[in-house]
Amino acid sequence: MNIAILGAGNIAGSMARTLRGMKARGQNVELYAVASRDLKKAQVFAEKEGFAKAYGSYEEMLADDGVELVYVATPHSHHAEHMKLCLKYGRAILCEKAFTGNARQAEEVLAMAKEKGVFLTEAIWTRYMPSRQIINDLVASGIIGTPKVLTANLGYVIDGKERIFKPELAGGALLDLGVYTLNFASMVFGDDVVRMESSVGMMDSGVDHTENITLHYRDGKTAHLLSTAMALTDRHGVISGDKGYLVVDNINNPLVIEVYDNTRSGKPVQVVNVPEQITGYEYQVEACMRAMAAGELECSEMPHSETLHIMRVMDELRAQWNMVYPFD
């Protein structure tokens, strides 16, 4: 499959390393093209990362009939615009999270994809990783009893980055980091939330730097979520039941999952190591290839309904905080 990258920033480099690793182990991927609004930047990226073609225009790359799948790697404030451009040319899309800046944009893009019959999915990598099934299988096994409470946190010191502090880039911790805690809760506890409470810390620029979110579920479960762009956190996810608890070492890229029983010995009764990976991005590419080969227009791992749900939850949170983007 000929894969093209729209955008030539850091995350595009991560995808390039992934594709090279997939190709090296014999998978059917080709590093076909990269596009930037700066031709020189695209050429430097293509030479460094091993892409066959470089374009100084997004439209020029999308007009290339050799392109089979486009990875959208631009800031999420521009995702809607760039996905619509891909759809104009009928190109299948793997779009980096957050899917769009708000739910309205997501609805517009998904409606356009449906109308044109073009494959489209969100690249929230944790949805595609094998760790997701490992966690769900452990919970379903009953080893921690009935799950009741979930906690998850994600924090990095990134408040000085433009994409974080600028409202016009859909900045803030929520769309960059909180999206992972929300997806972690959704994957484990589902989406039947009857009440959502939150508290937030705001930057002078008008976007969030830290938030605590509590989700109350119809069946009595609760999820407590923390994300911050101002501090390093342990990134743990903990799922607690009435017979024990399960600790995920990093909700943003799980590598080890430990299970503890109710003896409080401090020693895990089971340790599961996640399979070795190239970067972790390969699973979303593989899911796209499977879905497209089967003639599907979305990935079962992250269906359009889930993308919309998460976007609507983040819109609701921003409404609670009176946090508005210029394009809202």
Image (cartoon, rainbow, N blue to C red):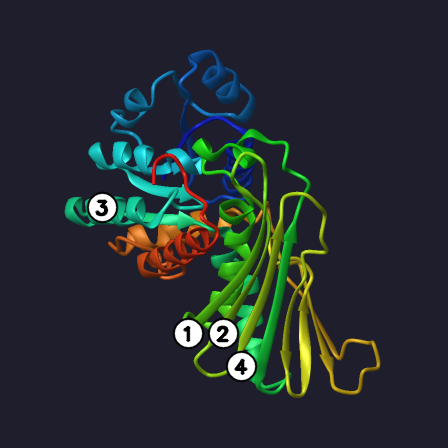
Q: Under tag 4, what secondary structure?
A: helix
Mark 1 or mark 2, which is nearer the start of the sequence?
Answer: 1
Q: CA distance from mark 1 to mark 3?
A: 30 Å
Residue at left offset 49%, top offset 43%: 26
- Marks 2/1 in contact by CB < 8 Å: the verdict is yes
Q: CA distance from mark 4 to mark 2?
A: 20 Å
Crowding at mark 4 (Cα within 10 Å: few <14, some 14-19, many 20+)? few
Instruction: Classify residue 110 as left or right of residue 147.
Output: left
Q: Under tag 2, what secondary structure?
A: strand
Tell me residue 239's x, y (percent). 62, 73
Residue topped by disc 3: 113
Which quarter of the rendered picture does the C terminus lie within? top left
Tell me residue 284's x, y (percent). 45, 50
Q: Nearer the viewer, residue 194 or 74?
A: 194
> Looking at the rendered structure, which numbered label has been put on residue 216?
2
- Nearer the observer: mark 4 or 1; the answer is 1
